[in-house]
Amino acid sequence: MSSTAPDTDSGLAWVAQRGMGALAEKMGFEWVEFTVERAVATMPVEGNTQPVGLLHGGAYVVLGESLGSMAANLYAGPGRLAVGVDINATHTRSATSGRVTGVCTPLHLGRSLTVHEIVVTDEQGRRCSTVRITNHIKDAPAE
């Protein structure tokens, strides 16, 4: 297993250096923990809702994809790039206020593919969505 982040502090520094992307910033993500084995971020419900006041299903997916893709890129290591090739989500509860938390763990870490599961919970710890993302690891393009 390759990893450029032996601990959460190093992993969070890696995220800060790389940036989380304009969409994650716009949606209010806050990174809590970041290693190859576990990545955690939160997102506010407010500002990310459907017209009826529920957290938008796409917001769950954006949180999941961000966590899974960033974790796969950390695992890929220098000179390699992880790109998403498949994502799916099952929403089982609706968040209407506060923050949700996404916890990303690897299901498979291979040479060319990673699979991560992201469980998104509300502030009461109830599962709201389960996201699974598969990333393909390849050589990064020459700069």
Image (cartoon, rainbow, N blue to C red):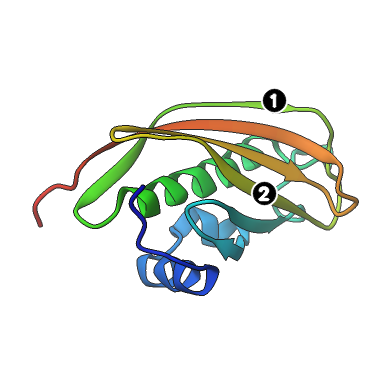
Find the residue positioned furthest to the right.
Answer: 124
Residue 13, x across and y down, in percent? 44, 74
Q: Which mark is residue 105?
A: none
Front in this rendered view, residue 40 or 20: 40
Residue displayed at 56% across by 59% down: 26
Neighbour tally class for label 1: few under 14, some 14-19, many 20 plus, Cα within 10 Å: some
Amino acid type indicated by mark 1: Thr
Helix, strand or loop status at disc 2? strand
- Specify whether 121 is left or right of 42: right
Residue displayed at 50% across by 32% down: 133
Residue 64, quarter of the rendered image: top right
Q: Earlier in the sequence, mark 2 or mark 1?
A: 1
Find the residue positioned furthest to the left.
Answer: 142
Amino acid type indicated by mark 2: Gly
Measured in 3D between alpha carbons, the distance from the residue under mark 2 to the one under mark 1, in whole angstroms, is 14 Å
Front in this rendered view, residue 20 or 139: 139
Is residue 98 shown above or below 61? below
Dividing the image into 4 quarters, which one contains the C terminus? bottom left
Q: Which mark is residue 90?
A: 1
- Specify whether 36 is left or right of 43: left
- Specify whether 95 is left or right of 89: right
Neighbour tally class for label 2: few under 14, some 14-19, many 20 plus, Cα within 10 Å: many
Helix, strand or loop status at disc 1? strand
Question: What is the number of callouts on the image?
Answer: 2
Residue 140, x across and y down, in percent? 18, 47
- Specify whether 127 is left or right of 39: right
Residue 142, x across and y down, in percent? 9, 52
Front in this rendered view, residue 120 or 20: 120
Q: Residue under label 2, please give it.
A: 102
Residue 4, x across and y down, in percent? 35, 62
Residue displayed at 69% across by 40% down: 119
